[in-house]
Protein backbone atom coordinates (compact mmCIF):
# COMPACT_ATOMS: atom_id res chain seq x y z
CA UNK A 1 0.00 0.00 0.00
CA UNK A 2 1.58 3.27 -1.13
CA UNK A 3 2.23 5.88 1.55
CA UNK A 4 1.74 3.41 4.41
CA UNK A 5 3.84 4.30 7.44
CA UNK A 6 6.31 1.88 8.96
CA UNK A 7 5.96 1.36 12.70
CA UNK A 8 8.01 -1.83 13.02
CA UNK A 9 11.52 -2.45 11.77
CA UNK A 10 12.31 -6.15 11.55
CA UNK A 11 15.79 -7.42 12.38
CA UNK A 12 16.44 -8.33 8.74
CA UNK A 13 15.46 -4.81 7.60
CA UNK A 14 17.80 -3.29 10.17
CA UNK A 15 20.66 -5.55 9.07
CA UNK A 16 20.05 -4.66 5.40
CA UNK A 17 19.99 -0.92 6.19
CA UNK A 18 23.33 -0.66 8.00
CA UNK A 19 25.60 2.03 6.57
CA UNK A 20 29.14 2.98 7.56
CA UNK A 21 30.13 6.58 8.17
CA UNK A 22 32.83 8.56 9.97
CA UNK A 23 33.53 12.00 11.35
CA UNK A 24 35.78 14.02 9.02
CA UNK A 25 37.79 15.43 11.97
CA UNK A 26 38.80 12.01 13.34
CA UNK A 27 40.73 9.58 11.14
CA UNK A 28 39.90 6.72 13.57
CA UNK A 29 36.15 7.40 13.44
CA UNK A 30 34.19 4.58 11.82
CA UNK A 31 30.65 3.67 12.83
CA UNK A 32 28.28 1.27 11.13
CA UNK A 33 24.65 1.72 12.00
CA UNK A 34 21.06 2.60 11.29
CA UNK A 35 18.88 5.57 12.20
CA UNK A 36 16.09 3.53 13.81
CA UNK A 37 13.94 6.43 15.02
CA UNK A 38 13.98 8.33 11.73
CA UNK A 39 13.10 5.20 9.79
CA UNK A 40 9.86 4.72 11.74
CA UNK A 41 9.02 8.43 11.57
CA UNK A 42 10.19 9.71 14.96
CA UNK A 43 10.92 13.43 14.68
CA UNK A 44 11.58 14.61 18.25
CA UNK A 45 13.54 11.58 19.48
CA UNK A 46 16.63 10.02 17.95
CA UNK A 47 17.32 6.30 18.44
CA UNK A 48 20.17 4.70 16.53
CA UNK A 49 21.84 1.30 16.35
CA UNK A 50 25.64 1.63 16.15
CA UNK A 51 28.63 -0.69 15.84
CA UNK A 52 32.30 0.27 16.16
CA UNK A 53 34.93 -2.20 14.91
CA UNK A 54 37.97 -3.07 17.07
CA UNK A 55 40.48 -0.20 17.14
CA UNK A 56 37.95 2.33 15.80
CA UNK A 57 36.18 5.25 17.50
CA UNK A 58 32.81 6.98 17.46
CA UNK A 59 32.91 10.54 16.23
CA UNK A 60 35.02 13.18 17.94
CA UNK A 61 35.22 14.37 21.57
CA UNK A 62 32.25 16.76 21.87
CA UNK A 63 29.59 18.25 24.11
CA UNK A 64 26.00 19.39 23.53
CA UNK A 65 24.30 22.57 24.69
CA UNK A 66 20.67 21.71 23.91
CA UNK A 67 20.15 18.06 22.96
CA UNK A 68 20.44 15.43 25.67
CA UNK A 69 22.12 12.21 24.59
CA UNK A 70 22.35 8.65 25.94
CA UNK A 71 24.25 5.45 25.11
CA UNK A 72 23.40 1.85 26.09
CA UNK A 73 26.08 -0.78 25.43
CA UNK A 74 24.68 -4.04 24.02
CA UNK A 75 27.97 -5.95 23.59
CA UNK A 76 31.72 -5.46 23.38
CA UNK A 77 34.13 -3.35 25.38
CA UNK A 78 35.06 0.28 25.06
CA UNK A 79 36.56 3.32 26.67
CA UNK A 80 34.18 6.19 27.29
CA UNK A 81 36.04 9.44 27.69
CA UNK A 82 33.80 11.71 29.74
CA UNK A 83 34.86 15.17 30.84
CA UNK A 84 38.57 14.33 30.53
CA UNK A 85 38.37 10.99 32.39
CA UNK A 86 38.42 7.49 30.87
CA UNK A 87 36.01 4.75 31.95
CA UNK A 88 35.93 1.17 30.68
CA UNK A 89 32.39 0.26 29.58
CA UNK A 90 30.77 -2.97 28.46
CA UNK A 91 27.55 -4.87 27.93
CA UNK A 92 24.68 -3.49 30.00
CA UNK A 93 26.34 -0.15 30.82
CA UNK A 94 24.34 3.04 30.30
CA UNK A 95 25.59 6.61 29.91
CA UNK A 96 23.53 9.79 29.92
CA UNK A 97 24.54 13.32 29.02
CA UNK A 98 22.05 15.95 30.24
CA UNK A 99 22.52 19.43 28.85
CA UNK A 100 24.58 21.40 28.88
CA UNK A 101 26.65 18.25 28.66
CA UNK A 102 30.25 17.51 29.46
CA UNK A 103 32.48 16.44 26.55
CA UNK A 104 32.31 12.73 25.70
CA UNK A 105 33.57 10.19 23.20
CA UNK A 106 33.64 6.40 22.75
CA UNK A 107 36.28 4.03 21.36
CA UNK A 108 36.48 0.27 20.96
CA UNK A 109 39.33 -1.38 22.90
CA UNK A 110 38.13 -4.98 22.50
CA UNK A 111 38.63 -7.75 19.96
CA UNK A 112 34.98 -7.72 18.88
CA UNK A 113 32.60 -5.03 17.70
CA UNK A 114 31.36 -2.53 20.28
CA UNK A 115 27.59 -2.57 19.71
CA UNK A 116 25.25 -0.02 21.28
CA UNK A 117 22.08 2.02 21.07
CA UNK A 118 22.51 5.78 21.09
CA UNK A 119 19.86 8.42 21.10
CA UNK A 120 18.55 11.67 22.38
CA UNK A 121 16.59 14.72 21.43
CA UNK A 122 16.15 16.09 17.91
CA UNK A 123 15.65 19.81 18.36
CA UNK A 124 15.40 22.38 15.58
CA UNK A 125 18.54 24.14 16.89
CA UNK A 126 21.59 22.49 18.45
CA UNK A 127 24.96 23.88 19.51
CA UNK A 128 27.87 21.51 20.09
CA UNK A 129 31.47 22.16 21.09
CA UNK A 130 34.57 20.23 20.05
CA UNK A 131 36.93 21.43 22.79
CA UNK A 132 40.15 19.83 21.53
CA UNK A 133 39.61 21.24 18.07
CA UNK A 134 38.49 24.62 19.43
CA UNK A 135 35.40 24.53 17.21
CA UNK A 136 31.68 25.09 17.72
CA UNK A 137 28.86 23.74 15.58
CA UNK A 138 25.53 25.47 15.12
CA UNK A 139 22.83 23.35 13.49
CA UNK A 140 19.49 24.85 12.46
CA UNK A 141 17.36 22.20 10.83
CA UNK A 142 19.53 20.67 8.12
CA UNK A 143 21.90 23.66 7.97
CA UNK A 144 25.22 23.26 9.82
CA UNK A 145 27.76 26.02 10.48
CA UNK A 146 31.18 25.57 12.08
CA UNK A 147 33.03 28.32 13.93
CA UNK A 148 36.44 28.60 15.54
CA UNK A 149 35.84 29.32 19.23
CA UNK A 150 38.87 31.61 19.20
CA UNK A 151 36.79 33.98 17.03
CA UNK A 152 34.11 34.37 19.73
CA UNK A 153 33.76 37.86 21.15
CA UNK A 154 31.81 38.87 24.27
CA UNK A 155 28.60 40.70 23.47
CA UNK A 156 28.35 42.86 26.54
CA UNK A 157 26.72 42.18 29.87
CA UNK A 158 23.24 40.70 30.09
CA UNK A 159 20.90 41.98 32.78
CA UNK A 160 20.04 39.46 35.46
Image: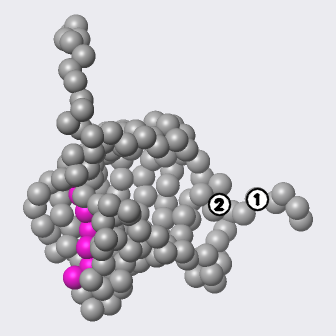
- 114 and 31: which is toward the camera: 31
**Left or right: 113, with 154 as reference point:** right
Is residue 143 visible in the rendered structure shown here? yes
Distance from the alpha carbon under mark 2 to that under mark 1: 7 Å
Is residue 59 or residue 111 the one in the foreground? 59
Can you identify the residue that label 2 sits on? 40
Query: Residue 139: where, in percent of width, then height?
Result: 45, 41
- Report if residue 104 lies within the magenta region: yes
Identify the residue position indicated by label 1 in the image: 5
Q: Is residue 28 above or below residue 71?
A: below
Q: Is residue 74 visible?
A: no
Residue at x-position 56% and y-position 59%: 37
Residue 51 or 131: which is nearer the viewer?
131
Measuring 14% from the left and 69% from the top, which residue is drawn there?
87
Q: Which quadrant, please, contains the C terminus?
A: top left
| Residue 47: x %, y % from top left | 49, 60
Return the residue found at the far left.
Answer: 85
Left or right: 124 as drawn, with respect to 153:
right
Mark 2 near mark 1, Cβ–Cβ under 8 Å? yes
Left or right: 55 as drawn, with respect to 87: right
Indicate whether residue 46 is drawn in magenta.
no
Q: Give the range drawn in magenta.
A: 103-109
Is 70 left or right of 155, judged from the image as shown?
Answer: right
Query: Which residue sits at x=37%, y=42%?
Result: 146
> Farthest residue in the bottom direction?
111
Vertical placement of 158 versus 44: above or below? above
Residue located at (41% from left, 77% from top): 51
Q: Disc 2 or 1, which lies upstream in sequence?
A: 1
SS assignment at label 2: loop
Amino acid sequence: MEGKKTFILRAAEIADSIQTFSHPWNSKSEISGVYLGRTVGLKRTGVNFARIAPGKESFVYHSHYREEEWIYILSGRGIAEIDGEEFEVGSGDFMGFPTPSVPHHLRNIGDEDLVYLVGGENLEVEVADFPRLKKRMLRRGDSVEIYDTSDAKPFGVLDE
